[in-house]
Amino acid sequence: MKTNRSNVGKWLYGILFLIVLPALLGAWSYGTEAMVGLPAIHHPAWGIGIGGAGLLLMLWGMFALWRYGRGLPMNAFPPVRYVNQGPYRWLRHPIYWGFSLFLVGASVFSGSASGLWLVTPAAILGMAALVWGYERPDLAQRFPGADKKVWFSLPEKSMEPPEPGQRLAVLIQVVAFWLLGANVWGFLAGNILPAVQWPWPLGQMSGAGFFFGFSWLFLLLVPLVVKTRLEVRQWGTGALAGSALALYLAFLWPAVGGQFLPDAPYQGAVIFWNIPICDFFVMPVFLVLLAARAYARAFPRLKVWMAFIGIGLALGLVAFSTAPWLHLLSGIVVYGFASNLASIWPALRGMAEWVANSWKEWVFGPVRVINHGFYVGAGAVLGTLIIGWLAGEAYAWAVVLFGAVSIVFSALWAQLIEGSEKLKRPYGYYGALVGILFSSLAVWAAGFQVWVVIGAFSVVMPWVQGIGRLRCLVNGCCHGAPVDNEKVGIRYFHPRSRVCGISDMKGQTLHPTPLYAILWLFFVGFILLALWQWGLPFPFIFGMYLLLTGLGRFVEEAYRGEVQTPILYGLRLYQWTAIASVLVGIVFTMIPASRPILEPTFGWNIVWAALVIGVFTFFAMGVDFPRSNVRFSRLV
């Protein structure tokens, strides 16, 4: 009987991921085609080639799991052996890589803009969330000590000389990322950005070839001359992380990308569309500066010369830019980020640990004021002010009504899930999402346009939540599970913290999960702000908020360690709710709704509304009655 159930489960699992999921993604692409204003690429031959290559890679990966792992490519029914043969010798997740290529090929074959620019990136993020939120912890638990290195990976932190394959692998990754990013940006810029005027006479452009050619040579030689595996790893990590940040900035702020005139003599690499590529200046500027830093480390006696060469190339590159100062400053900012990755995380981790042990309280008779309430109060004030800037003074008090009802439902949800003798007044994020239905009814009854309020809330909520996670650090809620690496985790010592009082993990090194959430929400907020500025419908913005925050929450939950959170079918409760958030978000992105024309004006009503909701939030989450034992009385 057990075998029959297992076989039925495998068939259902296979049907879900091989038939139902692709069909749903196709329906999502069709349902949002009219909303995605980006240009499509329609090239059947290239679509078949890319999609076919992806399908072959998927099948190769599935065969390797069956042959070497004695199992199927199913998380619910995983292989019994760790596989590092076949495509798993080269890539960590060949099936996901193949599926990504398949989606790109299908979008290019059908000429679907939504499939290429919305569905495919969202699916890639979903696969990444599945890897980081389930597969990595699961593999570490099932195969401890297994050699998980692949050819296309960064070398270990070692002072040994790198192998030729390690040098080549990192170089291929950096160059491939650069070419992919530059071509994608070039296609979008060539189709959606307005033409620009060249800042200098065209005769002076003849030097562009020298600067770009020498910059490429300067870049390509880096992994060949650095002396240790650690240096190769540092350069590769910085180049990849900086390139990702540069692309992120360019998509949010297109002027950062720059653009050549259509008749400019220099054209970058193009894949299959016949257009001149936009010169994405930020990326080569920061890459030559990063390369100069790597050369200076490899040849300390020549570090001054290397610095001069790097600065000279950077200045030479932006001399052919449409916005030299913007691109130079952007490149320097990205370089500062990429060259200081090793120190950024320790600084953030240290600040998170300080906040986690900063509990202070003041008692006035039966009333207690806790310092973490100031964080959520400040977040509510800031969020309301931004909503006022986006929607205008007319929606000031709608924000107060919407926010207050959401907070009430947040408390009701948490009381149902986590309420106990020790937790008299907890709060739950997903309760606030459920409360949106009732908040919307209240706003509608008050005569406001509901979608405007929901859309504006969607933009600011990631930042409000991020600030609110500082309260989580102080309170000890949403804390992480134990981690062996002290360079990753933080420790809680204050007796008022839930970590010490409920989870009994005082002094243990725990994943800083609130910090993980803060970082993700920070970047999500700017994406949603860009969607607002680009004029996307409000249901679409709300749907993307649910989708992006749901993906982040799925990963975060995998590293959380609250003892009171139930685990259902191998996943924590809030991982299931995160999956539901993603699915509901997809549905909302397909809702057609005309966007009303707003003429926001900023007035004192917005300020007063911000103060009212700020005080309400502060009182709800930072003031309690420690001597009482009734429900909702105590925060700790």
Image: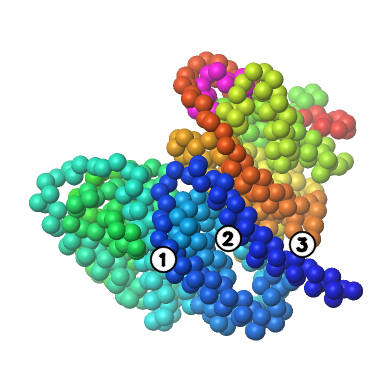
To which residue does mark 1 refer?
A: 46
Check disc 3 and give the amino acid type.
Answer: Gly
Residue located at (22% from left, 48% from top): 261
Considering the numbered disc 3 on the image, is that residue within a helix, a strand or a loop?
Answer: loop
Q: Which residues are magenta?
A: 386-399
Residue located at (17% from left, 43% from top): 199
Residue 158: give x, y in percent of width and height: 47, 75
Residue 599: give x, y in percent of width and height: 46, 21
Considering the numbered disc 1 on the image, is that residue within a helix, a strand or a loop?
Answer: helix
Specify few, some or many for label 1: CA neighbours under 10 Å numbering under 14, 14-19, or 20 or more: some
Q: Quadrant of residue 224?
A: bottom left
Specify few, some or many for label 2: CA neighbours under 10 Å numbering under 14, 14-19, or 20 or more: some
Residue 258: give x, y in percent of width and height: 29, 47
Check disc 2 and give the amino acid type.
Answer: Ala
Which one is closest to the eye, mark 1 or mark 3?
1
Residue 21: give x, y in percent of width and height: 64, 59
To which residue does mark 2 refer?
A: 128
Q: In front: 243, or 15?
A: 15
- Using the image, determine if residue 262 lies above or below residue 60: above
